[in-house]
Structures are given as C-alpha cells and as structure tokens.
Image: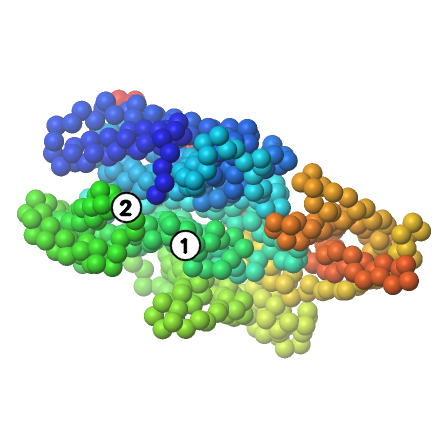
Amino acid sequence: MSFSWNAGNFMLLGAFATSAAVFIALLLKERGFNVRVERLRLLPWMTLALLTAATLHLVGLFLRSDFTYMYVWSYSSRALPWFYKATAFWAGQDGTFLLWAVIIYASALWASERLGFTDSLARRVHIVTHLIGLFFITMTLLVSPFRSIYDLYPELPRNFIPADGNGLNPLLQDPWMAAHPPLMFIGYGAATIPFAAAIAHLWRNDPRWLRIAHPWARVSWLFLTLGIAVGGVWSYQVLGWGGFWAWDPVETSSLIPWFVVTALLHAVVQNLRKGEFPVLTPALAALSFMLVIYATFITRSGLWESIHAFGETTTGPYLALLLVNIPIVSALLVADRAVRKKTEAGGHTKALIFAFLLAQGVIVLYKAFSGGGLPSVKEVAAIFVLTGVIFPVLRGRFTGTGEPIPDAPPRSTRLFTRTNLFYLAIVTLLILGFVSFWGLSYPFLMQALREVKVSVEIDFYNMWSYPFAVLLLLTIALCMGMGIMRRTQLLLGGAAVLLMGGAAAVFGVTGSPLADFLLPPLVYGFVLALWRAGKLLKSSARKREKLKLASFYLIHAGVVMIIFGAVFNTTLTSETEVVFRFVPGEGVLSGPQEIGAGYAIELAGIDVYENYEGYLTTDILVRVYKNGRYLGEGVARTINNEKFGRVTKVYINRNLDADVYVIFQGIGGHSGGVVEVPLTVKLEPFVNLLWLGIAIISLGILPGLFIDGFSVPWRRREKEE
C-alpha cells in the first residue's frame, strides 16, 4: 500500500481515531468499566466532519484538475465539464468507499443524537455501527483517493505534472449515471443501522430494536429502489442496446438485497403488530446487510465480468473477510436464540464471537507490522487456531443466562390468514433473491472448486423467476383483498384468474403464452390494490393514517405495474433495420420509412464535428411520425473515442403506447457518391408503464417515512420526563 502524508489522508486518519475512541470507550463501558460515555457526544460530529471535509477536498481536487493525484488523473481531464468533474469523485472504487463511509457515519451521528450513549441498547448499536464504519475507513485508506502519482511511480521527478488526465468514460458522462452510485450507496449505508440494531437485540433481547431499525430499513429500501431504477434508465438511454435490464452480474447483485430488504419490511410490520417472526426478523436484517457487502464484493473483486465492475482490485479479499464475518457472527447469535430460547445470548456464544474477532485483530496487527499485504492461507488458518486458543480464556468472562422467551400466543389453525400470507410473501421474496444469488454464485463456485468455466444465461433467471413472480402476484392480490372481500370470494377469484390465465395462454393474446398467463393475475392484483386504497381513503380513519396506509397499498399496485411493463415490453419489443441514403451537399435521397404499428422515421440531417474532447462525432437528426402525423425529432450520436472505443447516444421518442428507440452506430459504406446511414430502430411498448410503477412505489414509501419519522419513542418520553 502506497501512502501519501497529505491533508486528505490526515483527515481520514483523524476520522479513524475519533471513531475508534467511541468504539473502545463504549466497549469498555459494556464490559463494566467506569467510562463517562456522556462525554463522547462530540466525537461522532468530529468523525463526520472530517470525512465530509475529505470528501469536499477530493471534489476540489477534481474541479482544479490536480493531476498529481492518481485518482484525479485516472477519471478526469481538463476538457471535462465541471459537473462531471465533481461527480467523477465516485467513478472509481477509491471514492465510493469514502462516500460509503460518509453515509455510515451520517447514520451513526443520527444514532448518537437520537439514542444517546447511556442506554444499553443504544451503546450496542453504536458499537456495531462504529465497527462497520472503521472497516470502511480502513478500506478507504487501503485504496486512498489521495495517493499521489509520485508514490505510485517513484521514478517520476517531483516537478513533473501531467498535462492532462486520462478522462472519464463517455458512458459515465450522463446525469443518470452521475446519480446512480450515490443513490445505491445511500441505500447500502442505511442498511447498517437495521443490522446494528438486530445484532444488539440478538446479543441481549430488547424489542425496542424494531423502532430503530424500521425507519432505516425504509430508507434503505427507498434508495435501493431509486438506485436500481436510475441504473435501469441509464442502461436504457445510454448503452444503446434498447433494454433496461440484462441480468448483468453487478445489476443483478444489487437486486438481491432489495428482495431481502423488502422481505424485512414485511416481517417488521408483523413483528410490530403482533410480535410475530421474532427470530426471522433480526435474521433478515443481518442477511440484508450481508448481501449489501456481497453486491459490493461482486463489483470490486474483479471476479465477475461486467460493464459496471472495476476490474481486479486489492480490496476484494478484505470485503470477502467482512462477507465471512457477518454470516458467522449473525448465525451464531440467531442459532443461540433459536436453540436456547433465551432472551440473552449465552456466555459461550459471546466468548466464541469475541475470540473469533480478536484472532482476526491479532493477524491484522501482525500483517501491519510485517509489511502489510494480503493474508496467506496459513495466516487465515491461524485465525481459526487462535480462536480455539482464545475461546477457553474468554469462556468464563461472559455471562448470558437471560430469561426464557415467553411462549407465543396460540396461532389460528386456519390456513388462510394474514400472518400466513405475510409469511408466503416473505418466502417468495427470499426465493426470488436466491434465484439471482445462485445465478451469480454458481459460475464462481464451479471455477473455484472444479476449475470449470460455466456461464449462466438470461434464460436461467427468467425461467426460475417466472413461477415465483406469479406466486408473488397472487399473494399481493390476496393480501390486498383480505378485509374487503370474504375469504371464499377471494380464493375463488384467485382460482378464476389462474383459469383465465391458462385460457389466455392456450388461445393466445400477445403470442407469448408465458406473458398471456400473467395477464389476469396482474389485473386482479392491480384492481384489488386500488380498491383497497380507495376504500381506505373514504373511511373515517385519521387523515395521516389513511394517507400512510393508502400509499402502502399503492406501492403494491406499482409493483404490479412494474411486472406488467417489464414482461410485456420484453415480449412485444420489435426491431427493424433501416438504411437511408444521402449525397453530401445535396441531401437525403429517401423519405420516411415504416417501422411498424403506424410509426415511421425520417433522416433529416447529418452533422460531423469534433466534440469538446477532440473526438470525431457524428450526429444525425431523426424525425418520427405516426400515421403520417409528426411526433417529434431528435439527435442520435456516435463518438469515435480513441481511449474508450466507439460510444453511441441513442434518440428516444417517447409515446404513451411505445417508445421509438433509434440506434446509430456510424455511417456505413458509400458508392458512386451515395453514402449509406444504417439505423436500428426498436419499438418499446409499455416501457413507460414500468417507469410509472417505479415512481409510484418510490413515492409510496414517503408518507410512512414522514408520518412515522425517525423519532425513538422511549427517548422522547425520557426527554419529556
């Protein structure tokens, strides 16, 4: 690891020191030492302030085009517009780890201000949060964005300053991609608090953890939704292949935690209402954070080929270490709770966890003083040997008898209940997440265990996701209908839509049996969700509660719209190859050409020039008509970028029924003075229904967030008293 002693790295080290002070002080307090924890309040402020200052300093280096810093040189250039210079801050892994650390410590500051340090549950939440934060500050230091070119290339003279930077990939020079990484990392960072609260609860039973975890799980879900959606818009508008989802490894990995966080929110609701899912709920909180790290590992390890990945990096093994720790620690605590059925984790379980963490600390310190580098196989084995040595020493120092967990109230013997529907929804979401997880993990496991290269095609994801998507739609419909329809009516309606789906698949509506079968369940779920929301809004309930619950019902209607738009867009998309001919100086020889469904396009002009980076750029002006009526015009572009290859910018003419999607990849051949312009034109039906569904589910979570807020009820009562 090369390291520069400069202002940026000093800020990172200062943040590490202040966070470590909070972590150590609270750990000592939990072990019974007399520590004045109320004096720690300023330290989280200092940590966040130092990380924020480091972030602003890095943005300033980009804006000043200071190419003596390797990170700035790698992702910027003098000709780059200022907006993309600023957002290049998160173009590489160095900046994204810093961004993630800032988000974690912003949530840690919320926890310190809202929870304080005197409460035992609050202290345990702080301990886990700061431990995770320290890991990400360490990762930021390992691949510091403040490394200078002189550290990486010592042979360079100290007065050498590069004339220009490497530049930013043109595919990343887009507002949607500028927004995508921070949205994703806010979602990732927000998952820290539910995880910390769940571990604190499993360590020593405290049902208040749900009040801490619930709003942050909502925040994580909202920003994961927005991040995935914005990434889909970017793929659709920029990559030029005409799709919003391709089951790319990195985009698929981001979908997995979304499924689990969605399942977590359903479990939290039932736990808060009736005390149900007492073990499953904290297990889902731990699993969601583990999968956030897994998604990051896929992006950063370089082991998966993806247009989003950063290639082979040094941080992959460290992320793998965290990826191993989270499930082991969580599984020990969950298993302890499930087997012993005590309100507090047992002393042996606590001692084993501490022994495992201390053993890793010893190896990390050894590596730090022996020159650094990645741990060898022997050193990894030494961690487990040390765990076995330390465990007997710590075994008698931890207690955890606890009280027996009271028996749950007797459950209804009915099969068709709201609880069982929630359970079915949770299981279905987890299965959908597992399909994506297995599709990503299987090739890696085969390569590692058998040295066999295999690839999982898109058909695998579509085939295995389809039946569970149908089950999810039926579950949504049954949940929405519960309470406004009799159980018998609801079940008969479900059976009827399945029969209608079978009939539609046999007789054909769209030409795709699988899509046709989905149509009746989609309509059934959508109508029941709207009906449920409408009945609630007309009821005599309080306005705030009506708004909150109605918005949650609309979320389910939005999910139905997303499935409808995705399935029928993929099924009904058509593609046409057209060629226009023109003579330079005279104009286009051919008029509008039909592309189907009454649509036609016309080539209206061509412009060839050098863009702001000096690369040859060709623009074509395209006009779109439907049934002879002019709809609009726009530019499709191709850029011959010498560093990053040919880049295309598509033109999209948006309409209610379908988008006209024009792909231009450069001027073709010419003969006799006539030049050919080949275009690929796609008709993308129902894609706007997909975007509308995403907007609805994103907006639908906001009333609950604002109405319930982030306040912690017992802290509010303490302040009032």
Q: What element carries label 2?
A: loop
The front one of 70 and 101 is 70
C-alpha distance separating marks 2 and 1: 19 Å
- The mark closer to the camera, 2 or 1, is 2
Judge whether residue 356 can be spotted in this image. yes
Tag 2–tag 1 contact (CB < 8 Å): no
* Furthest residue toward right: 586
The front one of 308 and 711 is 308
Quarter of the picture holding the N terminus: top left
Look at 69% across and 38% down and name the residue there: 612
Quarter of the picture holding the C terminus: top left
Q: Residue 372 carries which label?
A: 2
Q: What is the three-letter code of the residue carrying label 2?
A: Gly
Residue underneath mark 1 = 301
Specify the quadrant of the image occupied by residue 659: bottom right
Look at 46% across and 34% down and name the residue there: 157
| Residue 48 percent location from the top left of the image | 37, 29
Q: What is the three-letter code of the residue carrying label 1?
A: Ser
* Furthest residue toward bottom: 506
| Residue 666 percent location from the top left of the image | 75, 56
The front one of 340 and 37 is 37
Label whose residue precedes the other's in the sequence (2 or 1)? 1
